[in-house]
Structures are given as structure tokens and as C-alpha cells.
Image (cartoon, grey):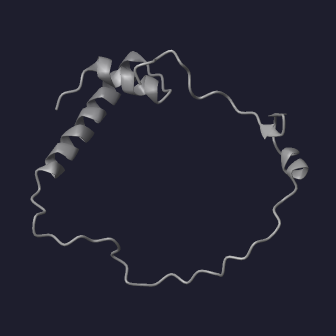
Amino acid sequence: MAISEEQAKHVAELAKLSFSEDELHQFTDQLGEIIDLVETLEEVDTTDIALTSNVNQEINVIREDEPRNGTNRDELMKNAPESENGFIKVPAIIDNKESEA
């Protein structure tokens, strides 16, 4: 399936990525190849193939779940570069410029 550079640019913007024109062209080609591969996989007949939830026959041994006190919030906040109202302050990753998403 061919994907347009405009579609690839839209995907990049959703992922908060920016590309030069050359990179955008390369990204478009790579994204098209990925889509082609997925379409090829969709053509494989898996009708008589049994479901596999785990290929490893080993059983995981897990420790008992025992409650214990966590680390003091004030101590944790000392490691945060910036905090506000008891929370770690991070850059915004969602903007409202695209309301169709």
C-alpha cells in the first residue's frame, strides 16, 4: 500500500516527531514497507493453527505479595528536577491543536 508523504507527516506529527524533507521521504518509504508487510501477513491462512498463548513451558515462580511502606514522597521529590503541588512537573505531550484525533 502506498502511503503519501502527507500521511507520513501526519503520523510523525502525532508522534511529536519532526523530519527534514529527505528524512520525511525515507520515513514515508519505510512506513509504506511496514504497511506492505502487515498486509502480507494478513493474507496468511491461520484457520487450522492452534492458538499459542505461551511458547515457553516453564512456570514462573513469584514471591508472595506482601504489603510494605513506600518511599517518603519528600525524599522522592528531591530527585525530581521540577515539581509542583507534590507532583513531578514534566513537559506537556498532548496539545489541543488537532481536535480530530
| Quarter containing the C terminus | top left
Residue 25's image quarter? top left
Q: Is residue 73 above or below residue 8?
A: below
Q: What x and y, as percent, mark residue 96?
A: 53, 18
Q: Is residue 91 above or below residue 35?
A: above
Q: Residue at x 32, y 28 (%)?
A: 26
Furthest residue toward front: 67
Residue 91's image quarter? top right
Q: Is residue 87 above or below residue 56?
A: above
Q: What x and y, as percent, mark residue 32?
A: 24, 33
Tell which of 55 and 26 is nearer to you: 55
Q: What x and y, as percent, mark residue 93?
A: 59, 29
Q: How many numbered circles are shown?
A: 0
Q: Is residue 71 above or below residue 27?
A: below
Tell which of 80 and 47 is nearer to you: 47
Q: What x and y, as percent, mark residue 28?
A: 30, 27
Q: Is residue 19 left or right of residue 75?
A: left
Q: Is residue 35 left or right of residue 99?
A: left
Q: Residue at x 86, y 50 (%)?
A: 73
Q: Residue at x 79, y 70 (%)?
A: 68
| Quarter containing the N terminus | top left
Residue 23's image quarter? top left
Tell which of 77 and 5 is nearer to you: 77
